[in-house]
């Protein structure tokens, strides 16, 4: 019940913001105010019983609260960065709709409904890739992304329909069940742009604005992955079949994504591509969680996803700020950037800490747990080393940042904070509206300070990332909580007679039957 | 088999065949709308009236959103195989689906739904894998979503009302997104050099064609159609006339007369 106000505001304000896109200021105001209200409402979500609605059920949880609060707060900060850098007019509306759809997908107890909602949220996010008067490249990206999204959604829908719960899983043909499991996992791989499905993701990183990347490549796929994880944990372990071949293929896709994604991020010379490929690599680690049909993967995967989405949001915002400040995305032209922009340097340091982690941090433990569960020694150590190699591309950016400044960095405009805006001249005011004192020109002030404001917003995002990666805000407890079960009481989700039958002995006792697939 | 369910399945598949193979965009939209309107009815028991109304409205709205996007580009490439081949393909897939009813365990829905799902899936594969233009891709994607919805009915029975509402929302969101992309594509295509454009139904190429990288052949817009005067064969005229009739049936023709 506590989720409904958030959904109403997120979906309503998001739709309104998108519908008024042509009036840019109005649309932005609606979107930003909506994001603010949605943040407050998301913070009020509680861990409650499923609420019956239209024949289904929806429930809030601590994990949903964390996911949505971080999403809305991150969305607000990204919107601030976008105002200071480049403003895609669909950004706040698409963010609100995407987060609303994600909240619905995580809260609803039926996996098929959840998949449809997560796919719908992803579809709306495509609008971000069409900036202003769309270019041919933007169209290519939008088309490819749309195709990937819908194909993944259809795979997920059919898989969720084939196995609607642990009891249904135990009575259908094992080959069909294995196909469903593999199809759902492949859908998640497509959504994350995992190798070999990475072409669309790479193009998105190239053509979409940096501030749009978090929604398209992180938040929407993460919501889809959480839905898939819930379904996998609830339905698939009911099988007697070990699904060795299917899991091996998924692990292979994950390992390839981790290794090649990290390598591509290290060798690529464009900061947007670095952000995109780093997301591909991190998505590979999330895929390991789907390959492990062990309840121990539940909390680790959810912790990892929560930490990754906020860290990549900060990373994308950092890339946007750097691009706007120095007018280039080429890493080779950015020598000395950290010396000229120390706040952004500090922010990247925070992003490194959150992204790579440190022993004792929640994100570090989650990654190690997933690797240990999915791969046997000694390959587990190698894979963990490959995953930790993320420090290389972050380190490369930091080292370049403290190198002697390049021409592009030297010739960048004077640091904004050194330019003091002039007070408004009386002559610029219409007659009869003279003010008794000199007020700073707000617009000039904004233009003068916007770089600094964007840098501070990135720094706040980095601080949030460190908090989540370290396990603050109750991340561990929220991630470990089992998914909400549909209440058998009046008003709860209806259950079929078959689903209310006793569970087979293979079913894990800590996984709730049927309705435990939403979050 | 229930006769009325079988008739509905035939209507769903026929709408899909028209949507995939028509070269007149408005006729394709008409086929897609027929498919979208009939697909939710393909369930036993029927969905509740309110969610069913939502699905029907969503299908009509999706058609209208696509209609808006093709105002300035009334033609599409259609199927290169032609409608008889598409119809045979859909028929074969439907028969396969009918034969495979219950393949995933005890069937939750009618076998006719499974047949329609197979047919829609087979029809959607071509436009999704090799889209001649954005509009055709849109047709493929919407058919895939409709097919998945029908497939859900076949595998798990009539969905709950909440599920119907979400599927309706997904249909509208997808049509809106595709419509936006298609309109932007038309603008980009209109800005492309017109001397390199050919009409799809006009027979041989007018000039060597550097393909746009939008994974599509050069676009046909009102602007480009004016600059290029192709040889229009009888096939084009028949298709055009059929498209006009279809458009009149829907009732609102906003595109310019060609």
Image (spheres, coloured by chain):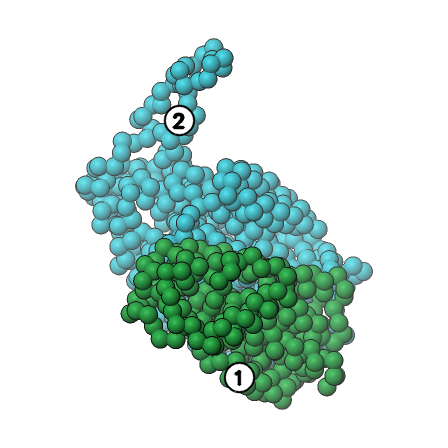
Residue B121, how many percent across, how many down?
Answer: 55, 77
Which of the pair B113/B250 is nearer the observer? B250
The quadrant the C terminus of chain A occupies is bottom right
Residue at horizontal 42 percent and vertical 55 percent from the top: B187
Side of A504 where B122 appears, left or right: left
Residue A235, how many percent across, how many down?
Answer: 61, 72
Residue A272 image label = none
Label 1 is found on which chain of the structure?
Answer: B
Give the Cα separation between the discs numbered 2 and 1. Answer: 67 Å
Shown colour of chain A: cyan
Q: Would residue A480 be visible to someone looking at this image?
A: no
Q: Would residue A256 be visible to someone looking at this image?
A: yes
Label 2 is found on which chain of the structure?
Answer: A
Single out the residue that lies furthest toward the top: A436
Residue B40, how many percent across, how many down?
Answer: 68, 70
> Residue under circle 2?
A445
Shown colour of chain B: green
Q: Judge the density around disc 1: few (<14), some (14-19), many (≥20) Cα neighbours within 10 Å.
A: few
Residue at horizontal 63 percent and vertical 82 percent from the top: B115
Q: Is mark 1 on a helix, strand or loop?
A: helix
Is B46 above or below relative to A298? below
Mark 2 touches mark 1? (CB < 8 Å): no
Q: Quadrant of residue A228?
A: bottom right
Q: Judge the density around disc 2: few (<14), some (14-19), many (≥20) Cα neighbours within 10 Å.
A: some
Residue at horizontal 38 percent and vertical 40 percent from the top: A85
> Residue under circle 1?
B84
Q: What element carries label 2?
A: helix
């Amino acid at each position: 019940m506590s989720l409904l106000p958030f959904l109403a505001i997120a979906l309503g304000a998001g739709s309104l913001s998108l519908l008024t896109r042509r009036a840019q200021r109005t649309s932005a105001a609606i979107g930003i105010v909506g994001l603010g209200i949605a943040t407050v409402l998301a913070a009020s979500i509680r861990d409650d019983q499923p609420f019956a609605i239209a024949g289904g059920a929806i429930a809030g949880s601590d994990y949903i609260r964390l996911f949505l609060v971080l999403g809305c707060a991150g969305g607000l900060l990204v919107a601030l960065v976008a105002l200071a850098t480049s403003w895609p007019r669909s950004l706040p509306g698409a963010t609100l709709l995407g987060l609303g759809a994600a909240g619905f997908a995580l809260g609803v107890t039926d996996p098929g409904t959840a998949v449809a909602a997560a796919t719908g949220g992803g579809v709306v996010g495509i609008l971000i890739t069409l900036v202003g008067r769309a270019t041919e490249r933007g169209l290519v990206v939008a088309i490819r992304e749309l195709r990937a999204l819908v194909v993944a959604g259809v795979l997920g829908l059919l898989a969720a329909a084939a196995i609607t719960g642990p009891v249904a899983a135990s009575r259908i043909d094992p080959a069909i069940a294995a196909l469903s499991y593999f199809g759902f996992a492949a859908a998640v791989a497509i959504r994350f742009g995992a190798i070999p499905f990475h072409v669309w993701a790479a193009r998105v990183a190239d053509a979409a604005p940096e501030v749009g990347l978090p929604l398209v490549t992180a938040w929407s796929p993460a919501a889809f992955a959480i839905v898939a994880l819930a379904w996998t944990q609830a339905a698939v372990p009911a099988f007697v079949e070990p699904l060795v071949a299917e899991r091996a293929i998924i692990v292979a896709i994950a390992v390839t994504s981790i290794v090649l994604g990290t390598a591509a991020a290290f060798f690529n010379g464009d900061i947007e591509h670095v952000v995109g490929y780093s997301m591909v690599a991190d998505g590979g680690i999330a895929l390991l969680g789907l390959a492990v049909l062990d309840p121990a993967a539940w909390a680790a995967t959810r912790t990892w996803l929560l930490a990754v989405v906020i860290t990549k949001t900060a990373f994308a915002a950092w890339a946007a700020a750097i691009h706007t400040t120095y007018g280039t995305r080429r890493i080779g032209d950015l020598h000395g950037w950290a010396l000229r922009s120390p706040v952004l340097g500090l922010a990247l340091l925070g992003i490194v800490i959150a992204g790579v982690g440190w022993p004792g941090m929640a994100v570090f433990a989650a990654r190690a747990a997933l690797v240990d569960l999915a791969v046997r020694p000694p390959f587990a150590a190698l894979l963990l080393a490959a995953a930790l190699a993320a420090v290389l591309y972050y380190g490369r950016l930091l080292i370049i940042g403290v190198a002697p400044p390049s021409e592009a960095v030297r010739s960048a405009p004077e640091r904004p904070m050194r330019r003091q805006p002039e007070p408004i001249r009386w002559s610029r005011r219409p007659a009869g509206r003279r003010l008794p004192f000199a007020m700073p020109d707000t617009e000039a002030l904004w233009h003068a300070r916007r770089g600094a404001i964007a840098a501070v917003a990135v720094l706040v995002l980095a601080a949030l990332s460190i908090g989540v990666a370290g396990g603050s805000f109750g991340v561990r407890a929220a991630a470990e909580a089992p998914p909400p079960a549909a209440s058998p009481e009046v008003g709860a989700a209806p259950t079929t007679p078959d689903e209310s039958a006793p569970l087979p002995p293979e079913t894990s006792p800590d996984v709730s039957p049927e309705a435990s697939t939403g979050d | 088999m229930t006769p009325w369910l079988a008739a509905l399945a035939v209507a769903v598949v026929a709408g899909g065949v028209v949507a995939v193979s028509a070269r007149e965009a408005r006729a394709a939209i008409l086929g897609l709308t027929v498919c979208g309107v009939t697909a939710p009815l393909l369930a036993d028991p029927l969905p509740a009236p309110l969610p069913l109304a939502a699905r029907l409205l969503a299908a009509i709205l999706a058609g209208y959103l696509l209609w808006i996007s093709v105002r300035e580009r009334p033609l599409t490439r259609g199927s290169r195989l032609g409608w008889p081949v598409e119809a045979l393909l859909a028929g074969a897939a439907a028969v396969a689906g009918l034969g495979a009813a219950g393949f995933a365990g005890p069937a939750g829905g009618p076998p006719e739904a499974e047949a329609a799902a197979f047919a829609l899936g087979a029809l959607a594969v071509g436009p999704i894998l090799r889209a001649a233009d954005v509009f055709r891709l849109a047709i493929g994607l919407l058919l895939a979503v409709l097919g998945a919805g029908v497939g859900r009915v076949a595998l798990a029975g009539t969905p709950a009302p909440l599920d119907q509402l979400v599927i309706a929302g997904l249909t509208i969101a997808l049509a809106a997104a595709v419509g936006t992309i298609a309109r932007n594509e038309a603008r980009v295509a209109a800005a492309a050099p017109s001397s390199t454009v050919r009409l799809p139904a006009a027979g041989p190429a007018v000039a060597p064609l550097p393909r746009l990288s939008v994974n599509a052949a050069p676009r046909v817009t009102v602007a480009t159609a004016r600059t290029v005067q192709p040889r229009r064969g009888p096939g084009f005229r028949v298709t055009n006339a059929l498209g006009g009739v279809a458009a009149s049936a829907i009732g609102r023709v906003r595109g310019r007369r060609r």
